[in-house]
Amino acid sequence: MRKEKILIIAPHMDDEVLGCGGTIAKHVANGDNLFVCFIANRIYRHKFNKKKNEIEKEYVRKAKDILGYKEAVFFDLSDERLDACLQDIIIPLENYISQVKPNTIYCPFQQDNNQDHRTVFSAARVVLRASATAFIKNIFMYEVPSSTEQSPPLLENAFLPNYYVNIAKYIDKKIKAFRCYRTEKRDYPHPRSEKALKILANKRGIEIGFKYAEAFMILRHKWC
């Protein structure tokens, strides 16, 4: 079976696990080469702290070891300020995608309640235009608990999944990877609690006939 190159575009350190943790583990188990690029650094109470940010990167590396993927890269752009200049995201993202040449990309949902998520999607849609990235077969949008479902209840903000990945074998690995992000964990019933993550995966599985699943929206899917 041909190995695929998979790229996860994560606005923040933890979005890769929240949105795609089980899918990442499944790709790795299938022998695919998986890469994650983290767009923003992490700030605390609206202020950047280099020492704390390095600790956050160590959380990424621990989660990476659990999920088993190939490479994590950090663009180190300003958290909560990504919407200041779209080109600051477009240029490094374009360069990295040209370097990796992934077959499949997972990016954040276009209408997440987090402004950084929306901005990263806006940059990705420019970089991933079909005329410039014919080598990419699949593009999916993922949901991020505590962000996607928090958008105002307007039709244009609805996350309507039409692609599901069975993660029944990988749900425990997803939860274990999420535990690495000590500063981001919350108590139930917060959406970023371990119990809530498992409930969401169970709900998504029920929608499609699996025990646990992660849900996505298709932006591009080339049938071979």
Image: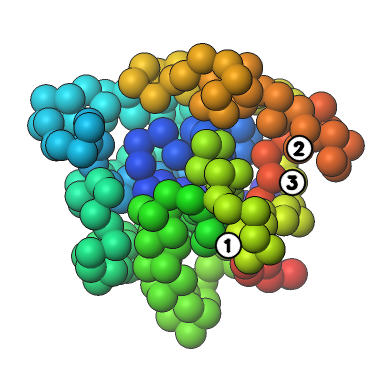
Q: Position of residue 187 (x, y in %)?
A: 51, 15
From the viewer's perspective, is the residue at label 2 or at label 3 nearer?
2
Q: Earlier in the sequence, mark 2 or mark 3?
A: 3
Q: Position of residue 83 (x, y in %)?
A: 29, 62
Secondary structure under tag 1 reads: strand
Residue named by callout 1: 139
CB within 8 Å, label 2 to label 3: yes
Quadrant of the frame with the C terminus: bottom right
Task: Tell me how far mark 2 sits from mark 3, CA to CA.
Answer: 8 Å
Residue named by callout 3: 164
- Point out the residue furthest to the front here: 153
Secondary structure under tag 3 reads: strand
In this view of the protein, can residue 131 be seen by the observer?
yes
Task: Tell me how far mark 3 sits from mark 1, CA to CA.
Answer: 13 Å
In this view of the protein, can residue 24 be seen by the observer?
no
From the viewer's perspective, is the residue at label 1 or at label 2 nearer?
2
Q: Nearer the viewer, residue 20 or 99?
A: 20
Q: Amino acid at mark 1?
A: Ile
Q: Position of residue 137 (x, y in %)?
A: 60, 67
Colour scheme of the rendered structure: rainbow
Q: Earlier in the sequence, mark 3 or mark 1?
A: 1
